[in-house]
Amino acid sequence: MVRNESFQAGHYPGRAFETPTHFPAGGGRLRQNRLWGFLAFALAGQFVAGTAAAASQKYQSGDWITECETEGGAPDCSLMVPFSKTENGQKGAFALAVMVATGDIAIVGQPVPVRAVLRIGNNPPIECRETQYCLFPREQSIAAIGQISSASVVLVDVLTAKASFKFSLTTRGYQAGLAQVRAWGYFAH
């Protein structure tokens, strides 16, 4: 883990941080590869060596992990937070993944989610229903990325075939990670 010690999580002197306003259409192979990487991350409950080795820059604030790669010249930054618990004897290990460059948000993990709902601050909930990994609809994801930047809490409901899991995540680490992405020079407006 690389940590910028001079950067204090939650402290952003004199700057307003915005999320990118342009997200590429589609998704394709990069989108699918990143989601499978997040699935491996969630399954392991920690960074797996292959995922960590590919990152050109990495930062962690609280439980949130920020990575940026510049393969091919275009930045590919993601922010993710793992969470887990046991509910009615069923262990669940998941990750909320935000892919800043593409404007995607997903929930991945084990057991495989069949449905997930995010409630960000006082905003209306968003929902995904997909197999393998739960990728939220693009339009809702783009709006949610901006909402996470200003909210203090994200409530997550993950439903699997045998159990329902409820989590409350703080956004402080996400906001610090996004500030670090900007400090690295990505997505500056």
Image (tube, rainbow, N blue to C red):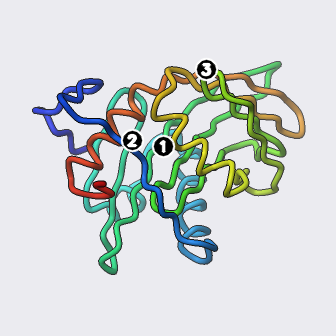
Mark number displayed over residue 168: 3
State the image coordinates of residue 129 (x, y, percent, origin top left): 83, 49
Label 3: how many Cα within 10 Å (few below 14, some 14–19, many 20+): few
Which residue corresponds to mark 2?
Answer: 65
- What is the secondary structure assignment of the residue under circle 3? strand
Which residue corresponds to mark 1?
Answer: 80
State the image coordinates of residue 176 (x, y, percent, origin top left): 32, 33
Judge from the rendering whether residue 152 lies leftward or rightward of residue 54; answer left or right: right
Q: Which mark sits nearer the N-terminus, 2 or 3? A: 2
Judge whether 11 appears above or below 66 on screen: above
- What is the secondary structure assignment of the residue under circle 2? strand
Label 1: how many Cα within 10 Å (few below 14, some 14–19, many 20+): many
Rounded to the nearest whole Å, what is the CA distance between mark 3 and mark 1? Answer: 14 Å
Q: Are marks 3 and 1 in contact (CB under 8 Å)?
A: no
- The amino acid at mark 2 is Ile
Screen quadrant of the C terminus: bottom left
Mark number displayed over residue 25: none
Residue at position x 60%, y 72% from top?
25
Judge whether 32 appears above or below 155 on screen: below
State the image coordinates of residue 164 (x, y, percent, origin top left): 82, 27
Label 2: how many Cα within 10 Å (few below 14, some 14–19, many 20+): many
Judge whether 96 appears above or below 135 on screen: above
Spot the residue most to the left. 6
Residue at position x 16%, y 39% from top?
4
Q: Which mark sits nearer the N-terminus, 3 or 1? A: 1
Residue at position x 78%, y 28% from top?
90
